[in-house]
Image (cartoon, rainbow, N blue to C red):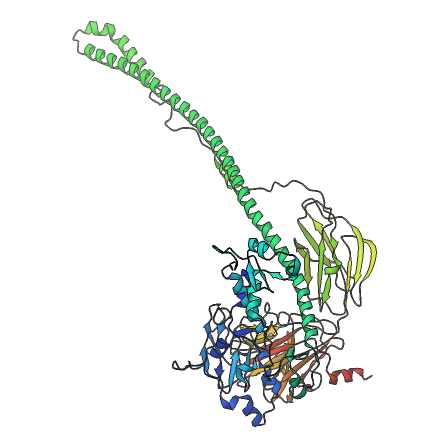
Amino acid sequence: MEEMEEELKCPVCGSFYREPIILPCSHNLCQACARNILVQTPDSESPQSRRASGSAVSDYDYLDLDKMSLYSEADSGYGSYGGFASAPTTPCQKSPNGVRVFPPTAPPPPAALAPPPPPRNACLTCPQCHRSLVLDERGLRGFPRNRLLEGVIDRYQQGRAAALRCQLCEKAPKEAAVMCEQCDVFYCDPCRLRCHPPRGPLAKHRLVPPAQGRVSRRLSPRKISTCTDHELENHSMYCVQCKSPVCYQCLEEGKHSSHEVKALGAMWKLHKSQLSQALNGLSDRAKEAKEFLVQLRNMVQQIQENSVEFEACLVAQCDALIDALNRRKAQLLSRVNKEHEHKLKVVRDQISHCTVKLRQTTGLMEYCLEVIKENDPSGFLQISDALIRRVHLTEDQWGKGTLTPRMTTDFDLNLDNAPLLQSIHQLDFVQMKVSSPVPAPPILQLEECCTHNNSATLSWKQPPLSTVQVEGYILELDDGNGGQFREVYVGKETMCTVDGLHFNSTYSARVKAFNKTGVSPYSKTLVLQTSEGCNFDIQGTPYSQLVDIKKMVAVAWFSFDPASAHADIIFSNDNLTVTCNSYDDRVVLGKTGFSKGLHYWELSIDRYDNHPDPAFGVARIDVLKDAMLGKDDKAWAMYVDNNRSWFMHNNSHTNRTEGGITKGATVGVLLDLTRRTLTFSINEDQQGPVAFENLEGLFFPAVSLNRNVQVTLHTGLPVPEFYASRSAMP
């Protein structure tokens, strides 16, 4: 029940609805909130003054103004009632629900004891869909009261209230378990068994839950809704055309006198049945969503557990690498220490050897000096030859590399760490998946395959008993003329919609599954034709089943495409209504492209200020989006002002025609790709001869406009009479 609470709150005040009224757009407002956001309009622009001045505007235009989106500058923070040229601009506010609302032009006087009546000429803008409408002389009383919503809110609030107590407990009343509608008494379980046994006359009494009993007690007797036009009459019939309950006076003298009506009770049961059927499908989706949420929550827990396990494994692997590196480090340090000891030993041995030799040389030198000091020639000559030989011998001993170091101070070791660093940088995760067999071919779900306009939706699934893991699917489509297949989708989804197909063409589609091991094998063929029914034919063919899609389409339904439009384009009304926030011309294309057949669509002019020059026609997908339609060679268009129209292609103007557009005008575009021609009309009057000929290729509906223009697209229309009669001529 808590999820329903947002449905029961007013988008303006953010509280539960109080005296809710139903707007023509099917949204609800509190009556007080609706009175607060009324906007007064000038008398000169009111529907009554326009009728009095003879303006060619029907009652339908003013009563159904809510069908047009009349707010402007959706992203600027300001809004105004666009239906009147002199309407004041008022800043937008936001309700507690975040919905944009439009306050009145002047606040009510604080001293007023009662809410002031609505202005004589006022308009109301729905804060949810921003559709505007003009109030008639009845004001807010012209909107029906939503008593059904009031009842739902009462039951919801009663369900949230404090628990009811038993009325028969003598001490400390317990919580009531049931209420008897006949006795009008609340019972707890012990008191019900003691005072209200289910036998005898009491067995026929109806016991209900306490909350339901309190609501029925409060709402009894039942409120009967009365007619908004005839307040003393109750609703007795249902107008099928207006989709609203009416009274008998509405049928005799009101605006419903010529409409189709049905019994109120029968339509009540029919709509209840339709709502129940719709709720069954929604209930299935909600059940699937709950199961999916359970699956996702289980996945969260599993992901957390797997993450902890994987992190522990990663840390262990990295620690093992670090241990191996430390062991290798110790081995390399040992080799360095050995080299260090060897060098020291060699140098120390050479030091010891040189010290002994130097001591001997020094002693010989001192002895020779003392001999030279003697004055006895005969004694000197007796030993001089021997001393000279000893000196030369000792000198020679020092000259044979004795004074050269036997070891260098540098270490002749160079650590080659480049391969290891490269391996560390290349250290990464690899998928360790168990090899699985080839998957089985998918099965196309014929009950979910369908076509619409120039698009086809295909759905498939794996065989129920297949346990082989599937990593994705490949959907292929031919060219519509029996040519080669091409891939149009590769992914994990089991449903795909293919857009941009030719009208009145036959396509063949096939799908196969794949995993790392390979692609699914061939299987039998199932041919499906969806022109007037479903015909099945089993054949042998590759992939899953071969689906033959054949759709004979008389008319096309499409809308404007936000994805390919210029960024300045503003969309509304389910992408059927467009305007622009720039003074320069911007281009917007339709979602559907045409290459075959006869197609007709219309564009109604919702707003036309300051005599701009909008352009209407067709274009290639790569047409310039920041220039007027027809300025390049990718568009064929008619641009118009309030007096004249021209045909334009590749910035070349041709066939000037008298007759322009105003607010409320309708521009028709007729693309005949059988005759390869393009024709235009304004208010069902053909503009000149055939505008363009020899058209060939893929064309998209296109419009260029600026901020002074707003248009609405109308599709799925039959060919106009002026062209149909000409086509019937031999």
Residue that appears at 63% across and 41% down:
433
In the displayed structure, does residue 83 sit left or right of residue 369?
right
Figure quadrant of the C terminus: bottom right
Residue 94 placement (x, y as % from top left)? 46, 71
The residue closer to the viewer here, 340 or 583, is: 583
The residue sitting at the left extreme is 375
Q: Position of residue 143 (x, y in %)?
A: 56, 79
Q: Residue at x 35, y 21 (%)?
A: 347
Would residue 106 be visible to someone looking at this image? yes
Q: Nearer the viewer, residue 343 or 184?
A: 184
Q: Is residue 700 above or below residue 444?
A: below
| Position of the N terminus by quadrant | bottom right
**Whole-percent x and y of residue 115?**
45, 81
Residue 184: quarter of image: bottom right
Which sits in the foreground, 437 or 397?
A: 437
Q: How many marks?
A: 0
122 relative to 534, above or below: below
Q: Residue furthest front?
A: 200
Query: In the figure, 286 relative to 152: above or below?
Result: above
In percent of width and height, residue 280 lies at 67, 61
Is there any visible trace of residue 486 in the rendered image?
no
Foreground: 31 or 463? 31
Q: Is residue 99 above or below residue 368?
A: below
Where is residue 692, by image quadrant?
bottom right
